[in-house]
Amino acid sequence: MTNQTLTPEILVIGAGPGGSAAAWALANSGHDVLLVDAAEFPREKTCGDGLTPMAVRTLDRMGLLDEVLAAGAGRIDTFRITGPFGISVSTPFENYQKEFPYALVLPRIQFDDIVTRNAVGAGVEHLFKVRVEQIAREGDQITQVEAKGPQGTIMILPKHTIIAVGAKSGLLKKAGFIHHDVRYIRASRAYFTNNQAKEPLYDFYFDFELIPGYGWVFSDGNGLMNIGVGILPIPLISTKKSTSQLLEQFVQRRQKEGVLGDVELAGPIKGYPLRIDFPAMRVAGANWMIVGEAAGLVNPVTGEGIDLALESGLIAARILHDNIEQGSRNHRGYQREVWDQFGPLFTGLRVLRDVLIMPLFTDYALWLMKQHRFLTRTVMSISQGFAPPQNVFHPRFIVNFFTPITPRLVIEEIRKKRQNNDTP
């Protein structure tokens, strides 16, 4: 076994969406980039597989949207939320996102491979099946990264480092980047098949049995479904059941309702954590940045993080390139920019999440959303990251929130009664 020493200009640790997006953008700007990951690609990745309209927009900007669609991604035009008492609200994505008014569903084994190959195709050097075991720092500067691969130990001496290790916090704790108790959603998902299911689905359920948490059903319309549950651990409130057991029961409830029909398990149930603790830590320093889920950038309401990983990776690449060009001595501008862009969003999402874990309030909010289109657009826009949380203070939103009975509702009830009276 031989030791090897590498001296890249930029090291990116983690070849998921955030790391690969950053590596691609930096290579396109003419930088020497080394991308390392413990896995061999393509590889399985446990996830809900949903690509939000924000992710679709970013993929288009990266020139990858056509390739993702060609890979068989299922297009979904409608977003649905169902509350504990069964009240359900559906709304087309086009109501709040005109440019790319749809979501996509594509298994991560395919999606991540597309994004990673895109980086490699741009000239990024890559080492896969290489696990980073230690990050050495002097003061606030990363000086050395130790990794191990099939051929032995690799010592990497980068000038700049982007860390994109996902939910795995052990390396970050050992290197002194994390000093707080990391908050996770504990989740499980599995693939199911139903050849009769031709309707694309992008549905979230806030069942009694899952509070404080949610379940999802994502379907590409071709018979493959990604179904899962996520539970926020809260003392004295969260269920003690395993997420795999909760998932099995969730599927049974949806079958009784007729949502799923006769689905068949197409693979094992897999559990995984989702880090939702942004902005609890520093994400930039003298010569380093942290992107994506490694920074806690996962939507605390829906558990979606691919969009935020792609976006934060591109932000990091832009700022790093500009800093190198300008001779800047640190990359803390990235810290300010991700806070400006995502900080208020996460504050609002946590408030929305806390509302959704109260069953009566959840269904009351969904009832209002059925009556008020403006309220629906506002809530959906905030939950998907297309509008700032401050929009809830709009006068029309406040009026809608305290107006449970609307003229539209009265007219609909009158119409129903007339139809019933006309029925022989």
Image (cartoon, rainbow, N blue to C red):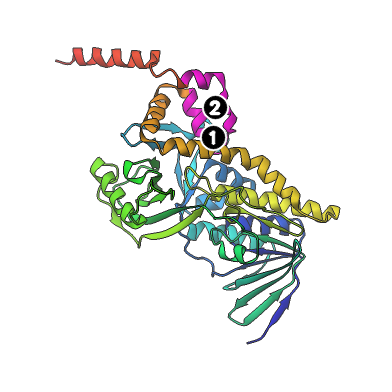
Residue 281 in the image, given as x and y percentages of width and height: 63, 52
State the residue at coordinates (25%, 50%).
262
Q: Identify residue type, mark 1.
A: Ile
State the residue at coordinates (51%, 22%).
397
Looking at the rendering, which quadrant does residue 363 occupy? top left
In the displayed structure, would residue 165 be above or below residue 279? below
Query: Where does the N terminus fall, quadrant-wise?
Result: bottom right
Please give the label number shown on residue 130: none
Disc 1 element: helix
- Tell me if residue 392 is in the magenta stretch: yes
Which residue is under mark 1?
382
Residue 416 in the image, given as x and y percentages of width and height: 27, 17
- Tell me if residue 261 is in the magenta stretch: no
Left or right, 115 with respect to 285, comes to left
Residue extending furthest front? Answer: 236
Residues in magenta?
Answer: 374-400
Which residue is under mark 2?
392
Q: Identify residue type, mark 2.
A: Val
- Tell me the distance, in whole angstroms, between the alpha carbons under discs 1 and 2: 9 Å
Q: Name the one closer to the observer, 275 or 233.
A: 233
Q: Earlier in the sequence, mark 1 or mark 2?
A: 1
